Image (tube, coloured by chain):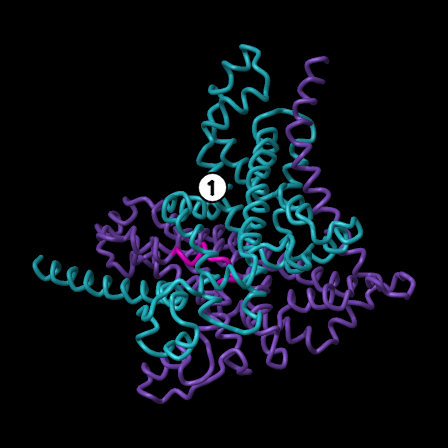
Amino acid sequence: MLNQGKHNQGWIVVSYGLLVLLAFFFLAPIWFTIVASLKPDDLVLVEAGTVKAFIPVQASLSNYSDVFKRVNFGLFLGNSILITGTIVMLGLVVNSMAAYALARLQWRGRNLLLAVVLALMIIPFEAIAVPLFFQVTVWGWRNTYIAQILPFIANAFSIYLFYTFFIGIPKELEEAAVVDGASRGRIFWEIIVPVAKPAFASVAILTFLTQWGSFLWPTMITVGEKVRPLPVAIAEFQTLPPIQWGDIMAFAVLMIAPVLVIFLLFQKWFVRGVASSGIKG
Amino acid sequence: MNQKNAVNRTVLAFVAPAFLGLFLFVAVPFGLAAILSLTNLRLGSPLPLKFIGLEQYRRILSDPAFSRALLNNGIFALVIVPLQTAVALGLALLLNRPLKGMALFRTLFFMPVVFPMSLVAVIWTLIYAPGPTGMMNSFLEFVTWGLWQPTDFLRHPLLALPSIMLLSLWQGVGFQMVIILAGLQSIAGELYEAAAIDGSNKFNQFLYVTLPQLRNTLIFVMLVTSILAFRLFDQIKIMTQGEPNNATTTVMYEAVKAAFEQQKIAKGSAMTVLLFLLVLAITIWLRIWGREERVIE
């Protein structure tokens, strides 16, 4: 028994050792980014190979003010917020309503449309990016917000996630309201939506993560700065002469800080949202 | 009858916006991809639009850059799928124990998942800075006791792709970890108790309880990772542009180059049709594989 205890304690020490090493692997690039963003430009590359890469020396915020001087960061941030925010909001409404009709209403063609949703789920966006680019060009939508928002509102995977959640809600919850003659719209907003908050949170987070980081599509569809979102802006900023890594890292921190704060506040929901996408897939 | 009409109107109001969107922005372009890939469409080209059958596919498949792209995607998947799944499983097993601080470590390992890939690519470009003062170079020099020769990782024909694999793993593994962790936590404790009573040790419990119970989760994780491997684009566009000598080019990078830079819509469409067929094949293969295993069970 005593032996067993010692054995376990040994394992615990080894586990923590491993965990700390791994934590370093995951944290080091992030910490390095933050430190580099505070350093004078010429020091970033010189000190990158030393322990000093992780210690802020001569720290100042001048790289941050450089970013605002050199590019229109506020515009890019605003574009990203506008595009992602609209997609998340409208996506929640549109996809949850479709899922509700598929999961809880009886009508002809229901199974067919459900099969359509399942089939569309396996089409990766990449497989349709080129014809969509052509379509949008023909419609004269290049370099617009519309082209970055409209195609991403309806989403087969979101419908499916809502569907699996709605199908599990007990029937009795709605029945009384149906008997009272409440409209389906009212039942949906006043009974289903409050019960399904976790599903809404999951879908909101997954949509947000995908759209906030979206790079391929805006790279193809945006020209110039007017409607450019952050992921494209940082890629451009990286190649903007003179190449100053302190400034680039300051841009990176400005881009991730709001997301990191939201993540740390709601991390339980982030993890749950991701996990639910796996359990149901 | 009237009631039925009312139900149909309600249904229509509920499903119309979503299905209109799916039709216009998924189904139509999907069909368009197949049709356009059989033509010679090029934006701004003076040539008349012509149906040329499978000519685009013939051209693409005999194009060495595209073959290299297919190979690179294949290598990427063959390395990253088992590696990332194994690392994610290891992390999940480490975290799935009643020790203090697990929530903190989970948060740390998951954090890169919220980082957009474009940002990760920019940060790691600096980490891979060439020359003896580059961070990765000095790190490797330190751990090999000075044996490591400073390298320009992203312009090295053999190291460029593995370098991109490492940051992809860094960013993506937390996602798989969380899914596997959820799978681990849904395994009934009684199964382990029964195994322990039968005298099976930790390793055998892992082999005969954990792995079979996790099978569907692991298959799902591998499916998602392989599909991501074939969609690889952001890192390539930002870090290497397919260089050196196509050592890091990918199907999606070639498709965007054709469609966007050269305005060859038909060529780009044909490439994405092939990308879809690949993804479909992987999906079907893993589904069948997953099901067969269950039948044996």
Residue at point 79%, 62% (across, down):
B266
- The amino acid on which the numbered mark 1 sits, given as a three-letter code, is Ser
The one nearer the camera, A150 or B60, is: A150
Instruction: Give percent across and percent down for residue B158.
Output: 52, 82
Whether residue A109 sits left or right of residue B237 in the image: it is right
Q: Which residues are magenta?
A: B110-119
The one nearer the camera, B220 or B237, is: B237
Residue B90 picture quarter: bottom left
The answer for which chain carries disc 1 is: A
Q: Please give the residue where the numbered disc 1 appears in the rendered image.
A: A202
Can residue B237 be seen in this snapshot? Answer: yes
Can residue B227 be seen in this snapshot? Answer: no
Number of numbered discs? 1
Secondary structure type for disc 1: helix
Q: Main secondary structure of the magenta part?
A: helix
Instruction: Give percent across and percent down for residue B150.
Output: 43, 86
Instruction: Give percent across and percent down for residue A101.
Output: 61, 29
The one nearer the camera, B18 or A221, is: A221
Residue B118 drawn in magenta: yes
As drawn, the chain in cyan is: A
Residue at point 34%, 53% (across, down):
B107
Residue at point 54%, 68% (across, down):
A238
Q: Is residue B61 above or below residue B279?
A: below
Residue B114 picture quarter: bottom left
Residue situated furthest right in the rendering? B48
Residue B74 picture quarter: bottom right
As drawn, the chain in purple is: B
Residue situated furthest top in the rendering? A180
Locate the N terminus of chain A by quadrant.
bottom left
